């Protein structure tokens, strides 16, 4: 659970931190495309070999960039590599239609704008992917410069400067964003781990205090019967005294069993109580059906307390049944009727049919208590249902 929470926190923080850089990348790409490229294309329209091809290429760039920007801002995936291929084809077409004097001009928009639109498509990927696409673009530009302007030293120098300028800023932005995302994710994981530790520590503190309170209560009740025995005011042969002793022993055994690390804590705690009465010679038929969901101590306690209290008062035999489902656990006890049977769960002052207590521990459910008795049998049941 804590791992899932940490992963969710990391994703949320990373998305929040990246929101600004994503908007900045979209603004840069479309600002350049609309404010620089569009006036240059319109101003040199008549100089292109095939103006309509250049115009169509500009529109294709716009459409691809719009799709990439929308998906980037929404956090949705894009068909990255097919769209990158489309941009590279448009770059080739624009080079083919651009006259030699305009190769290094903004009219040759594909070369200068390719990097920013590829950043929108490759957002979140590793830097080598962007470098590889820019390298292909640089190769296309080299072929175009050699074909349209020849291989003069001045042109090659301008080419090298253009490649450096067109590649440096997009790569630098991708590096910065990746580092920022890594730092944000690491910070989120650290904060989530610290929060989980503090939560577990607080829960352990509350659990420890609860166990101390219960142990103090047991010390008072068990101490009372031991004092009476020591002072001779209680007869060890008296069945009522024996049942009181069995009840206190059952509660103490269950308190000890609650801290054991076992696959099925509820069954373990119930077996500890059954063991107490079986040592006193009471035959107990203990049946468990189904798989029990994980339950906190408070819910297990509400399920077990009424039955173990009644079990400690049984005299002839008892049948204890536990039925588990993912969203429900039912614990029931059947035993012959006797005047010593306790008809109320511990801490419950309501009717014999009622709720032993609502779930306040975060398990997402409540525990119900039912008691029925006739001339022959006593039937006690506790039921937890998820909500």
Image (spheres, rainbow, N blue to C red):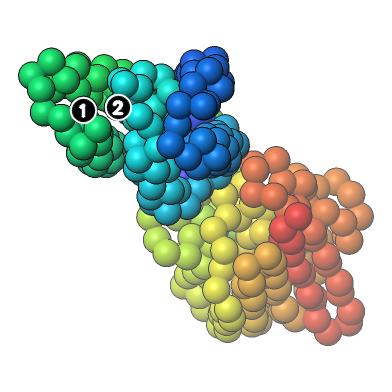
Rendered view: 142 above or below 82: above
Q: Residue at x 79, y 75 (%)?
A: 379
Tag 1 residue = 149
The percent position of residue 357, horizontal first and vertical second, equals: 77, 47
The quadrant of the image that shows the C terminus is bottom right
Rendered view: 207 above or below 329: above
Q: Quadrant of residue 42?
A: top right
Tag 2 residue = 100
Contact check, label 1 and label 2, Cβ < 8 Å: yes
In the rendered view, does 197 fall on the left or right side of 322? left
The percent position of residue 286, horizontal first and vertical second, equals: 56, 80
Q: Residue at x 38, y 55 (%)?
A: 261
Q: Looking at this view, is 147 or 22 the one in front?
A: 147
Q: Which mark is residue 58?
A: none
Q: Looking at this view, is 363 or 124 the one in front?
A: 124
* Label located before the other in sequence (1 or 2): 2
Q: Secondary structure at mark 2?
A: helix
In the rendered view, does 136 fall on the left or right side of 270? left
The percent position of residue 309, horizontal first and vertical second, equals: 67, 60
Q: Quadrant of residue 131?
A: top left
Q: Looking at this view, is 278 or 144 the one in front?
A: 144
Q: Residues within 10 Å of mark 2 (few under 14, many from 20)?
A: some
């Amino acid at each position: 659970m804590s791992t899932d929470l940490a992963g969710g926190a990391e994703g949320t923080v990373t998305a929040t931190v990246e929101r600004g850089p994503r908007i900045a990348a979209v603004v840069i790409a479309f600002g350049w495309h609309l404010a620089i490229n569009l006036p240059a294309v319109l101003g040199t329209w008549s100089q292109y070999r095939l103006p309509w091809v250049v115009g169509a290429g500009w529109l294709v760039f716009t459409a691809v960039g719009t799709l990439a920007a929308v998906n980037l801002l929404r956090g949705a995936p894009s068909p990255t590599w097919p769209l990158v291929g489309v941009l590279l084809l448009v770059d080739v077409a624009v080079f083919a239609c651009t006259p030699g004097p305009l190769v290094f001009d903004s009219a040759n928009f594909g070369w200068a704008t390719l990097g920013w639109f590829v950043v929108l498509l490759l957002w979140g990927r590793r830097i080598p992917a962007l470098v590889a696409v820019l390298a292909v673009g640089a190769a296309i530009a080299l072929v175009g410069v050699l074909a349209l302007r020849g291989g003069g030293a001045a042109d090659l120098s301008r080419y090298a400067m253009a490649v450096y300028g067109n590649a440096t800023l997009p790569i630098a932005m991708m590096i910065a964003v990746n580092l920022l995302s890594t730092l944000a994710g690491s910070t989120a994981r650290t904060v989530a781990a610290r929060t989980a530790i503090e939560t577990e520590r607080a829960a352990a503190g509350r659990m420890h205090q609860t166990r101390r309170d219960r142990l103090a209560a047991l010390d008072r009740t068990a101490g009372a019967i031991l004092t009476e025995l020591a002072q001779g005011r209680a007869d060890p042969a008296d069945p009522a005294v024996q049942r009181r002793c069995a009840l206190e022993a059952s509660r103490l055994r269950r308190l000890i069993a609650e801290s054991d690390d076992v696959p099925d804590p509820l069954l373990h705690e119930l077996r500890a109580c059954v063991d107490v009465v079986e040592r006193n010679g009471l035959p107990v038929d203990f049946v468990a059906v189904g798989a029990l969901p994980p339950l906190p101590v408070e819910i297990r306690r509400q399920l077990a307390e009424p039955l173990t209290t009644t079990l400690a008062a049984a005299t002839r035999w008892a049948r204890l049944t536990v039925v588990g489902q993912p969203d429900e656990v039912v614990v029931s006890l059947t035993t012959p009727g006797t005047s010593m049977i306790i008809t109320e769960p511990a801490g419950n002052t309501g009717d014999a049919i009622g709720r032993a207590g609502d779930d306040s521990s975060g398990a997402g459910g409540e525990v119900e208590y039912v008691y029925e008795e006739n001339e022959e049998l006593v039937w006690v049941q506790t039921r937890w249902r998820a909500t």
